[in-house]
């Protein structure tokens, strides 16, 4: 994968730039600009080189249909404000476009094609559509790591028809993930949460041979507690997974990786209720485990103290209720206090939401904007978008 930073003499060159600008919209108003903020360095780099930029992106899941509410118009206005340049939204049908139509005004520097997922050919990874897209520019740049697990026309097949490079953000994502999977500074610890252990079993098994500690938290930990013979009351858990958990512990033992889980918890009678700290043996039938307890937090902090690298994916509790935010908040703040003594990578929508809530996003070494791509990379899967650039 060659970086755009290696490109020279691209003045007036037409750059097809694939970005992930899939930001949350509420009544066409952007409620979180994080993904837009992340790709500004790539835009500024290309503008400084006097390139002509054609942005390709999407919002939502229109399933190949034109949906007015999923137009990229709010994104074009936001980009205009961020880079202090006019960003023209082109709504013409891509099959009717050519280079001259896109930059009909010589002063135009940045244009944005309308939602690429308005075309069914995009998700079908259509050959002719990919070729048509490629014909609109001279160089293709993928800076959408969070879309790179998709085998879509503007992500993978387009690279067959045009010289292709990786953007600044995609390099940052891959380098950060490589540091915790291939260029590891040990001891290395993974804090992993979420609602379903079955959805992250492949990640856990892929990390066990290279990690020293894996701390299982969130609703996933309920399955561990039940497997160990503890009562979990009315807590969320997955049925018939004992064989998976048994496999995890056996695999971890053979690879000298320690699996940790909560030894005390915070419970509530309902999701929006109050929090009560309890020992594992004190859990009642109508209790819901919604956060970790003080002793569990102390254990996690000790493991963090002994770590040189931390990967965190998944909150420790039901953070949507501030009464159960405590565990996630304490761990987030504790990791950042280690400063340059630890290399920290955070990924996953809910985890990023937690650190945004605490306003400490910039205190981690790397915060991934990706969801599915982040997890699939950790599973050891080859991402179509990355493979296409190699």
Image: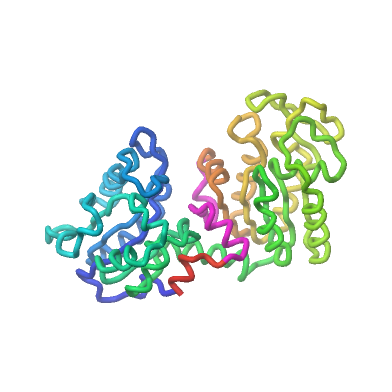
On whether residue 309 falls in the magenta region, the answer is no
Total numbered labels: 0
Q: Position of residue 344 (x, y in %)?
A: 59, 56
Looking at the image, which residue is at 81% across and 42% down? 225
Which percent across, then down, holds residue 69? 33, 38
Foreground pick, 69 / 343: 69
Front one among 212 and 167: 167
Q: Residue at the location (68% across, 63% down)? A: 206
Q: Which residues are magenta?
A: 359-381
Which quadrant of the structure image shows residue 292? Answer: top right
Residue 138 pos. (x, y %): 26, 71
Give the color scheme: rainbow, by chain, secondary structure or one colour: rainbow
At x 41% / y 62%, what residue is drawn?
Answer: 125
Placement of 332 over or under 176, stated as above or below: above
Left or right? Give the position of 233 relative to 197. right
Q: Is residue 375 magenta?
A: yes
Left or right of 237? Residue 310 is: left
Q: Nearer the viewer, residue 241 or 195?
A: 241
Along the horizontal axis of the image, is 258 left or right of 370? right
Q: Position of residue 270 (x, y in %)?
A: 68, 25
Q: Quadrant of the N terminus?
A: bottom left
Q: Quadrant of residue 282?
A: top right
At a point 21% along the width and 52% down the height, the residue shown is: 92
């Amino acid at each position: 994968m060659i970086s755009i930073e290696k490109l020279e003499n691209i003045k007036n060159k037409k750059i097809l730039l694939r970005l992930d600008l899939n930001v949350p919209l509420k009544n066409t108003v952007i409620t979180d600009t994080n993904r837009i903020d992340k790709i500004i360095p790539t835009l500024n780099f290309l503008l400084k080189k006097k390139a002509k930029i054609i942005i390709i992106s999407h919002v939502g899941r229109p399933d190949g249909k034109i949906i007015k509410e999923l137009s990229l118009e709010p994104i074009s206005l936001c980009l205009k404000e961020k880079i202090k340049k006019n960003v023209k939204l082109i709504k013409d049908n891509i099959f009717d476009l050519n280079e001259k139509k896109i930059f009909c005004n010589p002063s135009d520097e940045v244009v944005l094609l309308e939602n690429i997922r308005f075309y069914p050919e995009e998700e079908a990874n259509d050959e002719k559509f990919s070729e048509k897209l490629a014909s609109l520019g001279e160089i293709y740049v993928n800076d959408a790591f969070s879309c790179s697990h998709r085998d879509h026309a503007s992500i993978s097949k387009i690279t067959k028809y045009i010289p292709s490079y990786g953007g600044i953000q995609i390099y940052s994502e891959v380098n950060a993930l490589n540091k915790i999977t291939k260029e590891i500074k040990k001891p290395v610890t993974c804090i992993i949460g979420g609602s379903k252990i079955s959805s992250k079993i492949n990640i856990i098994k892929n990390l066990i041979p290279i990690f020293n500690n894996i701390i299982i938290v969130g609703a996933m930990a309920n399955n561990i507690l039940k497997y160990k013979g503890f009562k979990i009351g009315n807590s969320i858990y997955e049925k018939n997974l004992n064989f998976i958990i048994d496999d995890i512990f056996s695999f971890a033992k053979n690879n000298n990786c320690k699996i940790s889980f909560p030894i005390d918890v915070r419970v509530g009678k309902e999701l929006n209720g109050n929090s009560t700290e309890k020992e594992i043996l004190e859990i009642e039938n109508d209790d819901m485990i919604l956060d970790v307890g003080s002793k569990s937090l102390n254990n996690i902090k000790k493991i963090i103290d002994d770590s040189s690298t931390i990967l965190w994916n998944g909150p420790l509790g039901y953070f949507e209720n501030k009464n159960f935010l405590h565990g996630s908040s304490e761990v987030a703040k504790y990791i950042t206090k280690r400063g340059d003594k630890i290399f920290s990578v955070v990924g996953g929508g809910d985890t990023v939401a937690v650190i945004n809530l605490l306003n400490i996003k910039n205190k981690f070494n790397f915060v991934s904007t990706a969801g599915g791509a982040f997890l699939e990379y950790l599973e050891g899967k080859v991402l179509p978008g990355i493979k296409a650039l190699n």
